[in-house]
Image (tube, rainbow, N blue to C red):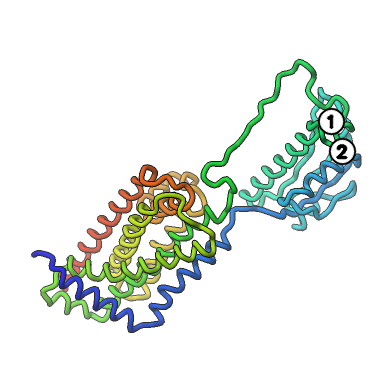
Amino acid sequence: MAIRSKRIIAQIIKELTQLGRDRLTLIMALGLPLVLLLVFGFSTSLDVNRINIAIQDLDSTRISREYISTFERTNKFKLVAQGSTVNVPRLLDTGQAAAGVIIPPEFARDLRRPEREAQVQVLVDGTDANTANLVRAYARATTNAFTENLRSPSSSTTNLIAENSRPSGSATPVTLQTRLWYNPGLETLKYIGPGALAITVTLFPALLAGLATAKEREQNTITQIYASSMTGAEYLLGKAAAFWLVGMAEVLLTHVESWGFFGLWFAGDPIPVMVGSALYIACVVLWGIFMGANSSTQSAVIQSVSLTAFLLSMQFSGYIYPISNIPIYIRWISVLVPARYYILLTRDAYVRGVGWIGVWSSILALAALTSLFFFLAWRKLQKMQVET
């Protein structure tokens, strides 16, 4: 039987009319994603700043004090205690400091000897492994800055260290110059913001579509549709198109909000992310209908959609940490998560700006998932019709 567009349009009007009667649900569907975007965008940060640090200076020389001043000048650390009597382990135990530095008694003397290496002990609270690694990296970078300052001819402390440079005739050290590609300012919002866009529009289109489907099944009004001349494909296309329009309205609002609050703007061709947005919303809507068709109650839809659409998108999309960090035996789940591909599109649109050449595979993946979810939802509706 051929698919007739009039029936699809009638189904779209019916779904939108029912949604429009429930003003509270409609307002929440369009307003809550905006609130979630602000929450995810501003509360999620990978930066670690103002780390409480304690320094025990057992050398008490001008050079050791200059080393301490290097930590004070950076915005990464907040010096909470310093001096020769500071008990660094105790401050770590009580939580007053997240890191500690112990400068040995012969620190300045070792710096004056080219054949010896001055050593400093750094103690880091390893409760949070990610923060601990960052603190260790910051401490190493601060120490490197101090060393470079000593080597500089204009340094005020250079004249305090005799023979601090390499012996004559030694090889010139390698200088590493780093250029940051795409995000030279290392702005966290340029990483978190585009990812938050995908997460915030994942839940509500799928949830609304799933609830509408489960409600018809729960109230047994879906039998009227089966008794009519409307085919399962027409019913599915009409219902999906209605909530797809709602989802696209969410996409538009959240992207406009990101321009104003996050300072994001297109770095390249916006067409790929527009096409990807249409496919992504289709994915989540069709998945919501599939979940609604498999649930006997609306409460079950809320739980299943929250788990499969929202939680999996948070954990398996690369929103916060790379997918390569996920254990390989469960990493395959990310292949079936549409947010994984949409985040690649939004980050390319707002940060990289490469365009089609860099994201065509994500577009194809979203198209494949849309086809898969459509088939699953259609098959389930067909099975329900036979059972009814």
Image quadrant in which you'd find residue 136:
top right
Tell which of 192 and 317 is nearer to you: 192
Circles 1 and 2, Cβ within 8 Å, touching? The answer is: yes
Q: Position of residue 324 (x, y in %)?
A: 47, 44
Which quadrant of the figure contains the N terminus?
Answer: bottom left
Circle 1: residue type = Leu
Q: Position of residue 288 (x, y in %)?
A: 32, 66
Tell me, yes or no, if residue 200 can be seen here.
yes
Tell which of 375 and 186 is nearer to you: 186
Please state if 232 lies on the left or on the right of 80 as rendered: left
Q: Position of residue 189 (x, y in %)?
A: 55, 56
* SS under mark 1: helix
Image quadrant in which you'd find residue 218:
bottom left
Circle 2 packing at 10 Å, graded few (<14), some (14-19), many (20+), is some
Which quadrant of the figure contains the C terminus?
Answer: bottom left
**Mark number, residue 111:** 1
The residue at the point 18 percent across, 65 percent down is 233
* SS under mark 2: helix
Circle 2: residue type = Ile
The residue at the point 28 percent across, 73 percent down is 213
Tell which of 109 and 250 is nearer to you: 250
Residue furthest toward the top? 169
Q: CA distance from mark 1 to mark 2?
A: 9 Å
Of labels 1 and 2, earlier in sequence is: 2
**Mark number, residue 63:** 2
